[in-house]
Amino acid sequence: MTEMKHLRLERFTAALRDGKPDARTAAWMQAMNLGFHEEPMPEAGLLAMTGAFTIDGRTLTGVYDEHVPGLSLNPQYPVGTYGSLVKSLNTGGGNLLRAHLITAVTVRPSHRRRGILRRMITEDLALAKANGLAIAALTASEATIYGRYGFGRATAINRVQLSVRDGIGLLAPAAGSVIAADPASLLELGPRIFAAQHAATAGSIDHPYFYTRFTTGEWADEEQVKPLAGLRAAIHLGPGGEPDGYVTYVFAGWDKKPAQLKIKSLVAANAAARHGLWEYLGAHDLIECVTGPAPIDDALPWTLTDARAYEITASHDHLWLRILDVPAALASRPYAHDGTLVLRVRDSLGHASGTFGLRAASGSATVELLAEESDADIELDVTALSSLFLGGVPVRRLAEAGRIAGGSEVLAGMAELFAVDVLPYCETGF
Ligand SMILES: CC(C)(COP(=O)(O)OP(=O)(O)OC[C@H]1O[C@@H](n2cnc3c(N)ncnc32)[C@H](O)[C@@H]1OP(=O)(O)O)[C@@H](O)C(=O)NCCC(=O)NCCS
């Protein structure tokens, strides 16, 4: 692409030199913060992030303009940033699939719409495919950016506000108990409880390392790794006394009306722990409501004595997926019904293109690439297949939306094959 003239792309890992982040690593992080409108990062933050990036094995991509005028902001800073790391995705039934996570995508305003994102992402997806990754994942700042690269919306997330003026009444009292805790006590316990939630939740992405320190309150957010003052924590103990859930939260301040607690992170290995933690939050005196993230398919309102106390204040897409290897991805999820299906998949980048035969039996499927001229039951784009993958949208909805072509009987059979009992949920941001 001619616009990429004078622009150099480098792919590297975060590195230390004499105990400090090397110049390229530090410049990349500052450029990323600039792109997300954050303050410049102090040296201690750069060092902490370098450690976290190393633990996660992140690959950093920077695009550098060799011809920026002398007056320009530090010419060492890349004009485009892009990061990737591999973490597991729960594809249902406890199955974990290695997923290629994309993060930290920024392009400087002076360099937008010159193909920088296109080059970074198309090269990166090709490398991920070559490295054997069957699926890529991201969370998007805008819903219009990533469809052109084959990503489809796969999970959504709600923000809810629970009115707790008189506490929370539960129709089925949650088993176990809740204790107040120091967030620091979650350093090792937090990741253990998250691992149990991750294993039990279809759509969940494993936490990047940042979350370990976020849970303890040492790092307030990923762009500014400084302590979060006023963080509180509580731990849920199951009937046998074993920790199986935790919540971290802050008081929003006396100026905020209605008086409220904000959940920073609520992680639970089972529904009883989750409901017990909400009940505990609702038991705080002087508090009128509790706000936080919640699954769109949430059991909590169904156990409240006052279901109207639970209000959804926002709802939006969260996880976007992009299948890179159709046989490997489709074989990694469970199937509640037996059946066969021949799918023709279109993909403008080619990674998922082809005609595939899927045979589901006894809960799992085998999927093979067929000859191109084979008759197909269903035709769809990789974006639609990626949205269907976890069952976050019914087959029928996508057919009504004109995104899947096939006869009505075949569509009904496909709907049975792809159906899930609980909608997928991902609470991890990255
Ligand atoms: C989003 C962003 C990375 C795009 O970078 P860019 O280098 O300008 O994108 P490109 O020039 O490679 O554009 C590639 C294509 O995406 C389209 N596109 C890019 N940004 C878009 C947007 N925000 N909305 C709709 N389309 C967009 C371009 O029109 C182009 O389309 P085409 O290939 O069909 O012609 C950049 O605008 C940015 O840094 N935004 C702020 C930070 C952000 O939102 N990051 C994403 C975090 S998930």
Image: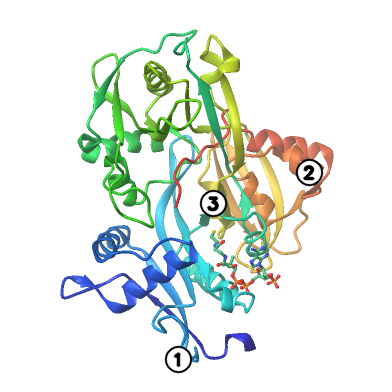
Q: Does label 1 or label 2 sit earlier along the sequence?
A: 1
Image quadrant of residue 415? Answer: top right
- Nearer to me, 385 or 243: 243
SS assignment at label 1: loop
Residue marked by disc 1:
70
Please, is residue 276 above or below residue 10 in the view?
above
The CA distance from mark 3 to mark 1 is 48 Å
Please, is residue 243 above or below residue 84 in the view?
above
Q: Residues within 10 Å of mark 2 (few under 14, many from 20)?
A: some
Q: Looking at the image, which residue is at 57% across and 51% down?
A: 320
Residue marked by disc 2:
399
In the displayed structure, does residue 164 sit left or right of residue 5? left
Please, is residue 64 above or below residue 181 in the view?
below
Q: Does label 3 or label 1 sit earlier along the sequence?
A: 1
Q: Looking at the image, which residue is at 81% across and 48% down?
A: 402
Q: Does label 3 or label 2 sit earlier along the sequence?
A: 3
The label shown at residue 329 is 3
SS assignment at label 3: helix
Amino acid at circle 1: Gly
Q: Looking at the image, which residue is at 26% across and 72% down?
A: 15
Amino acid at circle 3: Ala
Q: Looking at the image, which residue is at 66% across and 55% down?
A: 383
Some atom of ligand 1 lies within 8 Å of the CB belonging to the residue at label 3: no
